[in-house]
Image (spheres, rainbow, N blue to C red):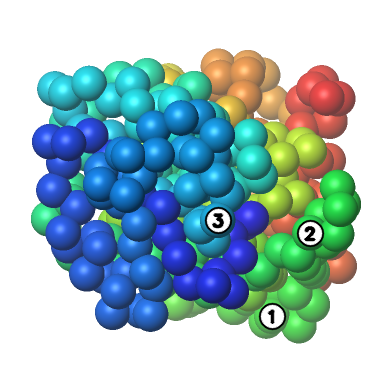
């Protein structure tokens, strides 16, 4: 992600009605100085130029969206953050119902501001994300990588008759992706789109965008179950700011089966063993780019 935590400062944009005390405390405990958009020093600098300078001078940006109040200022400041190359981290209250497609590409989480555990988890993920240095207009990113022997070992284990991953193949997928150098990987416990996990990586911007949702199933079978799953995945995409979803499965229809035509246009699919096999020598972005091209989407 494009978060560079050298000066350890964070700009928080939030409506006046949002209590960001816990968020600020979490940041402060990790050595980050929180600058809240409601602070007098920022409010006094009300001109766009001064607001721009306040955001640029911070190392990363957090927007807080609260249900039932006016969030227009937050949306405006999210736009400034994205326009200056600071990808925004967005916290929205669980009851927030507004369309979030306008913040596509941002790390977007439905988390209540009193949910300290979830806030800590997400902030720790962001802090650990690979740093990106800027040299003029060029961006030097750490490219996520193939995982070689890790994928080979996971593949050998998951294909055993009594595999420990058999009932929960998502754990093997999480271990594989987590080892590949993606910027942020969030499991469903902290990600409220409904999908098993969401992945953010700067290199995904040129193919499927951020985040990439991932759903992992043990078995896909039965016309009724398949129709239900297709509708479920469509809901996941509609309720998030994601553009694409990757469906992985241990057992399911043949890859060229007409069954897949029931699924939303922006759902890619692949058996877990094949995914791990490709992951030995290719990185996640290459795998996803190939799947997207195979679906008929070249751009």
Query: Residue at coordinates 63% horizontally, 18% vertically from top-left?
Result: 265
Q: Secondary structure at mark 1?
A: helix
Q: Quadrant of the C terminus?
A: top right
Query: For residue 134, which numbered disc appears in the image?
Result: 2
Q: Position of residue 259 (x, y in %)?
A: 60, 22
Query: Residue at coordinates 12% horizontally, 36% vertically from top-left?
Result: 17
Residue 5 picture quarter? bottom right
Q: Is residue 251 above or below residue 178?
A: above
Q: Secondary structure at mark 3?
A: loop
Tell me if I can see residue 154 in this picture: yes
Name which of mark 1 and mark 2 comes first in the sequence.
2
Looking at this view, is 159 or 202 the one in front?
202
3D distance between C-alphas at marks 3 and 2: 15 Å
Tell me if I can see residue 224 in this picture: no
Name which of mark 3 and mark 2 comes first in the sequence.
3
Q: Is residue 172 above or below residue 19?
A: below
Query: For residue 57, which numbered disc appears in the image?
Result: 3
Badge 1: few (under 14), some or many (20 or more) residues near its Cα, within 10 Å?
A: some
Looking at this view, is 89 or 181 the one in front?
89
Q: Position of residue 162 (x, y in %)?
A: 47, 76
Q: Is residue 15 left or right of residue 144?
A: left
Q: Position of residue 219 (x, y in %)?
A: 47, 46
Q: Is residue 295 above or below residue 4?
A: above
Query: Residue at coordinates 25% horizontally, 63% vertically from top-left?
Result: 24
Name which of mark 3 and mark 1 comes first in the sequence.
3
Q: Are marks 1 and 2 in contact (CB under 8 Å)?
A: no
Residue wearing tag 1: 150
Looking at this view, is 47 or 143 the one in front?
47
Q: Secondary structure at mark 2?
A: strand
Q: Is residue 33 left or right of residue 286?
A: left
User: Which callout, 3 or 2, points to the residue nearer the camera?
Assistant: 3
3D distance between C-alphas at marks 1 and 2: 32 Å
């Amino acid at each position: 992600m494009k978060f560079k935590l050298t000066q350890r400062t964070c700009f928080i944009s939030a409506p006046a009605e949002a209590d960001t005390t816990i968020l600020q405390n979490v940041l402060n405990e990790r050595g980050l100085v929180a600058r809240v958009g409601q602070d007098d020093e920022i409010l006094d600098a009300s001109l766009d130029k001064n607001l721009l300078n306040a955001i640029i001078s911070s190392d990363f940006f957090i927007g807080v969206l609260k249900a039932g109040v006016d969030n227009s200022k937050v949306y405006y400041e999210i736009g400034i953050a994205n326009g200056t190359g600071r990808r925004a981290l967005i916290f929205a209250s669980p009851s927030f119902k507004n369309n979030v497609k306008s913040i596509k590409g941002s790390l977007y989480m439905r988390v209540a501001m009193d949910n300290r555990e979830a806030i800590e988890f997400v902030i720790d993920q962001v802090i650990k994300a690979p740093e990106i240095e800027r040299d003029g207009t060029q961006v030097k990113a750490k490219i996520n990588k193939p995982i070689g022997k890790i994928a080979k070992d996971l593949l050998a284990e998951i294909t055993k008759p009594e595999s420990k991953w058999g009932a929960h193949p998502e754990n093997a997928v999480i271990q594989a992706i987590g080892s590949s150098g993606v910027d942020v990987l969030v499991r469903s416990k902290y990600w409220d789109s409904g999908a098993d996990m969401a992945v953010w990586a700067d290199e995904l911007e040129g193919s499927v965008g951020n985040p990439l949702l991932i759903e992992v199933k043990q078995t896909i079978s039965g016309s009724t179950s398949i129709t239900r799953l297709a509708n479920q995945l469509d809901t996941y995409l509609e309720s998030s700011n994601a553009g694409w979803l990757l469906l992985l499965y241990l057992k399911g229809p043949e890859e060229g089966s007409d069954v897949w035509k029931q699924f939303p246009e922006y759902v890619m699919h692949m058996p877990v063993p094949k995914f791990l096999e490709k992951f030995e020598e290719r990185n996640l972005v290459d795998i996803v780019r190939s799947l997207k091209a195979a679906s008929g989407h070249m751009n």
